[in-house]
Amino acid sequence: MTAKKPGYHQFNTNETLNFMLNRLSWDIEEERLREIGQNVSTLDNFVEKMLLEARLAEDENRYLQAGFFYRGAEFFMSEDHPDKALAYDKFMEYFYQETHGASEQHSLVDFAGGKLGVIDIPAEGDEKGTLLFCSGFDGLIEELYGIGLSFAAAGYRVVLFEGTGQGSALRRYHLPMTHDWEKPVAAVLDALAIESCTLIGMSLGGYLAPRAAAFEPRVKQLVAWGAMQDFTAALKASRGKVVGGLMFKLVDMGCKKTINRLAARMMATDETAKWSINHGMHTSGQTTPFGFLKWMLDFNLNDTAQQIEQDAIIIMGENDHLVPVEQMRIQADAMINAKSVTTRLVTAKEHGAQHCQIGNPDLVIDEILRWMDGLVRRDLRIAS
């Protein structure tokens, strides 16, 4: 992630494509993305354009940008796309080739017959503590590297890690995502001999990190960079509460054929739904839409939020297009035994109202650092 002025841009009228273009603006200049956004209208021609831009960047020796163009293409490729594995491999090759220090900081942790990728960034100056940081449903640790450097510059050791269903754990070692996130967290803590940490989870990590914190005592502080009390709320919001609610009632009733038939109709007329359901099945390791929706039901904090005893902060944008904003209040209210719970709703005026504060991640970094510094001052007052 390179330094950029805060702002969420209107690169494309398609909300899904526009969000991805804004995501890429952390590493690719806005002018180029604006031109690209004006010339794509479907997921398929977005993939074609990203591949074209990647190859052009390669020809011009702009290898890091080429890598992120390949990442943009890979994100929307179907799982059977002939170039999907190549696009991911190209992204990884160019990222580690062009990003100073990242290759030496990268390692693999054994887990469940596969491996989890880790980037261990040392603190600058005196080390204040360790931050363990994961993404969500479809992020890569390499995309978080710039954020990791910002935390490292503030004096923290930063361990970016993949769990099941993420990055190379899914793509190279075929580990589908599981809801019991305390297990991959424990494996990383064990492998790196980490005795205590602050755990940060972004996007779906707003469920994953709290879930792990409820069961892993080495997590001393918790950051949900994105509220996610219940993963199904995101799908219900995208389809409408009535339709989305009905779908999960049918799942509860075991109506496999009905769900699969409804999903097939939806996928036949809505390219975003087609991609998201196929992507969901791949990430979850399920083979049918019914299986994917049933899998989603395990991703909630209804029975575990009360077991969270750490200090916690939940950060969310007021215009999050993927997660209903009320998830932040519901999640905070459910953490009844937490040492403290802080919430931060980021506004459009602050350029961070969208999912994961794509338009202004530096604001969230500063917010988390201030929150942690405040906890240190509080604990010193209590001890004195």
Image: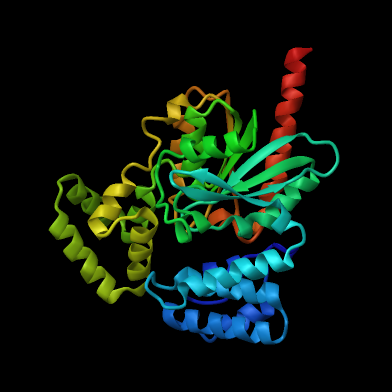
Say which quarter of the image contains residue 59: bottom right
Residue 102: % across, % down: 71, 57
Looking at the picture, tell me which residue is in the foreground, 315 or 350: 315
Looking at the picture, tell me which residue is in the foreground, 279 or 316: 279
Residue 55: % across, % down: 61, 84
- Left or right: 150, with 350 as reference point: right
Say which residue appears at 49% left-offset and 22% top-offset: 337
Return the residue found at the far top: 384
Display colour scheme: rainbow
Against 157, residue 274 (above or below) is below
Say which residue appears at 43% left-offset and 50% top-offset: 324
> Where the C terminus falls, by quadrant?
top right
Residue 356: % across, % down: 56, 54
Q: Is residue 291 visible?
A: yes
Residue 196: % across, % down: 64, 29
Say which quarter of the image contains residue 297: top left
Say which residue appears at 30% left-offset and 56% top-offset: 286
Against 166, residue 345 (above or below) is above
> Where the N terminus falls, by quadrant?
bottom right
